[in-house]
Amino acid sequence: MDFFFGCPTKVKPEGNQEARICPRCHNAAMFSAKSRTWFELCFVPLIPMNSKHVWMCGICQLQVNTQPGWEPQIAQPGYQHPQLQGQYGSPQNAGYGYQPSYTQPQPQK
């Protein structure tokens, strides 16, 4: 009879879930989470072996242990990734899509 066992790590969000800026990829995708390593037998988690609080990025998967005095920067409303700023039009046309400029036909002489 075959038995399968392992020790995978599972991450669950916890606490304040405000969007925060990831120091690696600069996306507003960091969140507070609890990382826990389990002993599994036949793919069933049985015994929690290790537990720690982390900051995790949902895009690049960066995990940083929670440290006293350090938190990722909170993303302000309207935050835009630094490399994408200015690529999608000016803010005065935001929400209106393509705005063609209409010219008046010139009278024939």
Image (cartoon, rainbow, N blue to C red):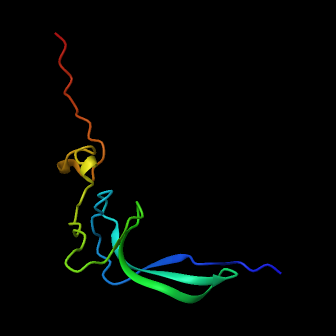
**Residue 2 at x, y percent in the picture:** 79, 78
Question: Which residue is the extreme one toward the right?
Answer: 1
- Does residue 7 sit above or below 23 in this rendering? below
- Does residue 80 sit above or below 102 in this rendering? below
Q: Residue at x 21, y 48 (%)?
A: 93
- Does residue 14 sit above or below 94 in this rendering? below
Q: Which image quadrant for residue 51?
A: bottom left
**Residue 45 at x, y percent in the picture:** 60, 85
**Residue 59 at x, y percent in the picture:** 41, 61
Image side of residue 1 versus residue 76, left or right: right
- Does residue 16 sit above or below 81 in this rendering? below
Disc tally is 0
**Residue 54 at x, y percent in the picture:** 36, 76
Query: Foreground residue, 99 or 1?
Result: 1
Q: Residue at x 83, y 81 (%)?
A: 1
Query: Foreground residue, 96 or 14?
Result: 14
Q: Quadrant of the C terminus?
A: top left
Question: Which residue is the extreme one toward the top?
Answer: 109
Query: Foreground residue, 88 or 36?
Result: 36
Q: Residue at x 29, y 75 (%)?
A: 18
